[in-house]
Amino acid sequence: MQRRKVFILGDSHTTAIAEAIKRRQETGKDIDSPLDFYASRFSKQKANGAVVPGLSLQDAEALLSKARKTDVLVCVLGGNQYNTLGLLEHAEPFDLIEPETKAEPQATNARIIPLAQMNAAFTAFVESVRRAVAHHMTGFKGETFYLNPPPPKRDNAYIKKNAEGYFRSEGKVRLNVSPPDMRRRLWSIQSRALSRMCEDLGVRFVDSPVAAKDNGFLKLDCYGADATHANAHYGELILLQLERLLIDSKVSS
């Protein structure tokens, strides 16, 4: 019997999952799964002209057009908007208040951003993600999922040491990392915006695995090599989560 195909396509957060699939294949464990996983990030040209290798949009469309109705598309698109906004401290400090959350106190001179205003901002931030998901759903016969990006890393020293070039250029000489709780709250607001997006599109929202989180932060054994991404262990937790979700026909973290 032909296994159910699961296409995991998207941006940089796809890499950890692709690495987990590669490790399964190298050890022969991939044949133990009733699902046939395929993961690739999309190729992309950076501002400096360098090209990130991956699947072209045209090849992705051709791949998905051949899918069966029982196959599944998992979109791993965007997800770093909260880091772009809040990984580094701003010249003008800001804070936000969530009624349901006990947050660590921030700078007393911080400008307070109303939660409704921040929600509206993230709804606008994820609009490009919405368009991309809607585009890839077009013509795809099976069910579409959206995978929430991994939560933030708590360790500021690790982030400062391993920050990607984009954040180093943004931070100029000094790389002042924002408080961990601020990043956690921004990730939570972004997650809710993405969940609303999925509801509007009729897409299943899949949160990051519970096993990968520690009080709202990414567990240390899931840290990728830079400030914002996860590793192959996290990718394996995603595969296990998708197996439970698709085999048991229910969400399970």
Image (tube, grey):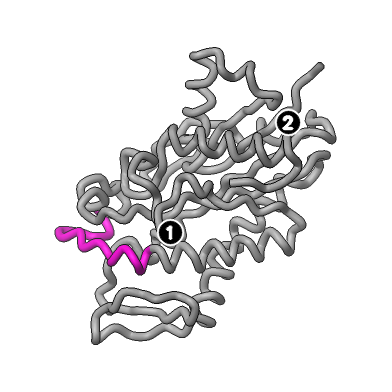
249 falls in the magenta region: no
Q: Is residue 176 magenta?
A: yes
Viewer-side residue, 8 vs 84: 8
Residue at image point 70% right, 52% down: 204
- Give coordinates of residue 150: x percent, y percent: 47, 50
How many numbered marks appear? Answer: 2
Q: Are marks 1 and 2 in contact (CB under 8 Å)?
A: no
Q: Nearer the viewer, residue 97 or 49?
A: 97
Residue type (three-letter) at the residue carrying disc 1 = Gly
Nearer to us of marks 1 and 2 is: 1
Residue 70 place in picture, x, y as percent: 82, 34
Q: Earlier in the sequence, mark 1 or mark 2?
A: 2
Residue at 51 percent of width and 33 percent of height: 236
In this rendering, is residue 251 above or below 65?
below
| Label 2 Cα neighbours within 10 Å, binned few <14 / some 14-19 / many ≥20 | few
Residue displayed at 65% across by 54% down = 205
Q: Secondary structure at mark 1?
A: loop
Residue 22 placement, left or right of 143: left
Q: Which mark is residue 9?
A: none
What is the number of the mark on residue 216? 1
Q: Residue at x 54, y 36 (%)?
A: 41
Q: Return the residue found at the far left.
A: 173
The label on residue 62 is 2
x, y percentage for residue 25? 54, 17
> Marks 1 and 2, how far apart in space?
38 Å
Front residue of this view, candidates 12 and 149: 149
Left-right relation of 236 to 143: left
Q: Is residue 144 above or below residue 36?
A: below
What is the quadrant of the N terminus in the image? Answer: top right
Q: Which residues are magenta?
A: 168-183
Residue 188 placed where, x, y %?
49, 65
Q: Amino acid at mark 2?
A: Ala
